[in-house]
Image: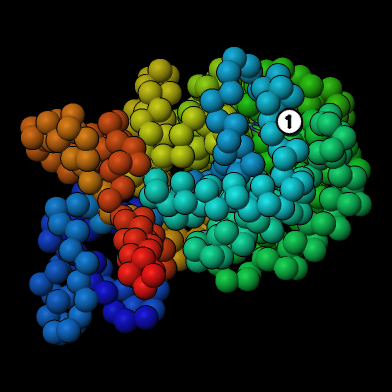
């Protein structure tokens, strides 16, 4: 692949911002550029410097006046729920039983799984998300479809088959042994292949017997380099049910601790109704609490207490949780995150929002050397954001006077229309791909 210079207003974070004025937390080049070579970032700086060093003959993708950022990262969502977004009226357990456990049965069909996996990846890309951590269904076919679609697009994706052996319809249940064997086989096939990473995925304590939790413990011990994902303390009825199924545990978190499932690679969806003790256990083990604002509002679950996580030193990340989450857009997700925190008297600065979607989420995955920031040696996963994509945004931007204000407009008013382009390992995947497809169709038409 030949070198490309991506020109625009380059913004990348180097650490967590301490507030809205913390200019030391990021690098910003008003007329900047990213040099991409063989799918990697080779250099970042001002356009003038990089163009001089690159010499004549270099291809230039000129995205001025748009922003150039690292690709966005979503740390929790469900690929088989892509077509079940906007399912009306129920809170978590009723919603799972009424809609989700019906929808996920469709994924025993490889063809359906492949169709939705392709649409899912393209929807992520259309929203500027280049890496996501996803649950597949219980069927290995769904995992094949998921990683195949990611590989076709060369995306760095993390995912795994959910394990469930109770409190779900028979067609969605595995057994402790089957869950173990299928997971083991999928790890062997996919983990570390290209850009794929596997996540061992017992869905949550309600849908796994103690025997399946034992098998999960074995999988985690045998594959310490895989991620682990599950759900924790999302809804009061869920907590009561989960803890009733594990009477020996002192609280919901203790169920997972007692099976050695908590560590730096563990992502715990929601974590809303947590005692200080439970958050402290996350802090000690390095497990990550995943804040899913659109989902938590949609299901009427509750409000994630970010400040308490920070005070107790626990790691956290942010995610859409599609299909309880109502949008694939990380911009729309941060808009709702802002409001969820505001309701609790907590403030989320736009700098912090953009940090969270990029470097913050990369750090939560311990992948900051590869994704989430633009530095020499990083993978060239890049998003181009247009802060004037909608007429109302263009009007609002006429009176914006700082970068932080522009970022706040983007997160408050923006969506997929603001994603002008997205690069995956250096290849344009939104407009660029559409144009390539159009050219091919035109060429084919000219031949007949
Ligand atoms: N808890 C267990 N499964 C799920 C799921 O699919 N979505 C959400 N939001 N919570 C869950
Ligand atoms: Fe979820």
Q: Determine the residue positioned at 65% across, 56% down.
A: 145
Reading the image, the residue beneath label 1 is: 102
Q: Is residue 165 left or right of residue 57?
A: right
Q: Nearer the viewer, residue 257 or 222?
A: 222
The C terminus sits in image quarter: bottom left
Q: Is residue 355 left or right of residue 148?
A: left
Q: Would you say residue 26 is visible in this rendering?
A: no
The N terminus sits in image quarter: bottom left
Q: Is residue 334 left or right of residue 87?
A: left
Q: Residue 181: which quarter of the image?
A: bottom right
Q: Determine the residue positioned at 82% across, 31% down.
A: 168
Q: Nearer the viewer, residue 308 or 271?
A: 271
Q: Would you say residue 179 is visible in this rendering?
A: yes
As drawn, 38 above or below 440: below
Q: Nearer the viewer, residue 134 or 111?
A: 111
User: Residue 447: where, in percent of width, then height?
Assistant: 36, 73
Q: Determine the residue positioned at 22% across, 40% down.
A: 389
């Amino acid at each position: 692949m030949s070198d490309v210079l991506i020109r625009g207003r380059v913004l990348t974070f180097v650490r967590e911002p301490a507030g809205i004025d913390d200019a030391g937390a990021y690098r910003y080049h008003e007329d900047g550029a990213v040099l991409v070579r063989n799918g990697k970032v080779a250099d970042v700086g001002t356009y003038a410097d990089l163009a001089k060093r690159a010499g004549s003959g270099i291809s230039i993708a000129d995205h001025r006046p748009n922003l150039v950022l690292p690709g966005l990262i979503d740390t929790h969502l469900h690929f088989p729920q892509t077509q079940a977004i906007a399912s009306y009226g129920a809170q978590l357990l009723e919603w799972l039983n009424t809609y989700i456990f019906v929808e996920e049965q469709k994924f025993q069909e490889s063809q359906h799984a492949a169709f939705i996996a392709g649409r899912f990846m393209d929807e992520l890309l259309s929203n500027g998300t280049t890496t996501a951590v996803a649950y597949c269904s219980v069927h290995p076919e769904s995992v094949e479809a998921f990683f195949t679609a990611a590989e076709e697009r060369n995306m760095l994706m993390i995912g795994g088959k959910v394990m469930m052996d109770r409190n779900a319809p028979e067609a969605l249940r595995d057994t402790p042994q089957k869950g173990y064997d299928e997971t083991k086989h999928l790890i062997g096939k996919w983990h570390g292949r290209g850009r794929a990473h596997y996540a061992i995925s017992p869905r949550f304590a309600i849908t796994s017997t103690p025997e399946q939790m034992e098998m999960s413990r074995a999988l985690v011990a045998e594959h310490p380099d895989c991620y682990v994902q599950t759900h924790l303390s999302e809804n009061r009825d869920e907590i009561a049910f989960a803890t009733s199924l594990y009477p020996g545990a002192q609280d919901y978190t203790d169920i997972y601790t007692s099976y050695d499932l908590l560590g730096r690679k563990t992502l715990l969806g929601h974590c809303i109704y947590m005692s200080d003790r439970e958050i402290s256990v996350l802090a000690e083990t390095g497990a990550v609490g995943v804040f899913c604002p659109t989902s938590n509002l949609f299901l009427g679950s509750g409000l994630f207490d970010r400040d308490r996580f920070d005070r107790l030193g626990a790691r956290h990340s942010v995610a859409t949780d599609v299909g309880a989450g109502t949008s694939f857009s990380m911009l729309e997700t941060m808009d709702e995150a802002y409001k969820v925190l505001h309701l609790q008297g907590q403030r989320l600065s736009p700098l912090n929002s953009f940090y969270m979607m990029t470097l913050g989420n990369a750090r939560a995955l311990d992948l900051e050397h590869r994704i989430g920031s633009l530095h020499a040696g990083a993978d060239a996963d890049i998003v181009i954001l247009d802060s004037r994509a909608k007429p109302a945004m263009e009007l609002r931007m006429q009176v914006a006077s700082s970068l932080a204000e522009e970022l706040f407009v983007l997160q408050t008013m923006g969506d997929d229309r603001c994603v002008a382009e997205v690069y995956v390992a250096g290849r344009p995947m939104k407009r660029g791909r559409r144009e390539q497809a159009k050219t091919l169709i035109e060429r084919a038409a000219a031949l007949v």
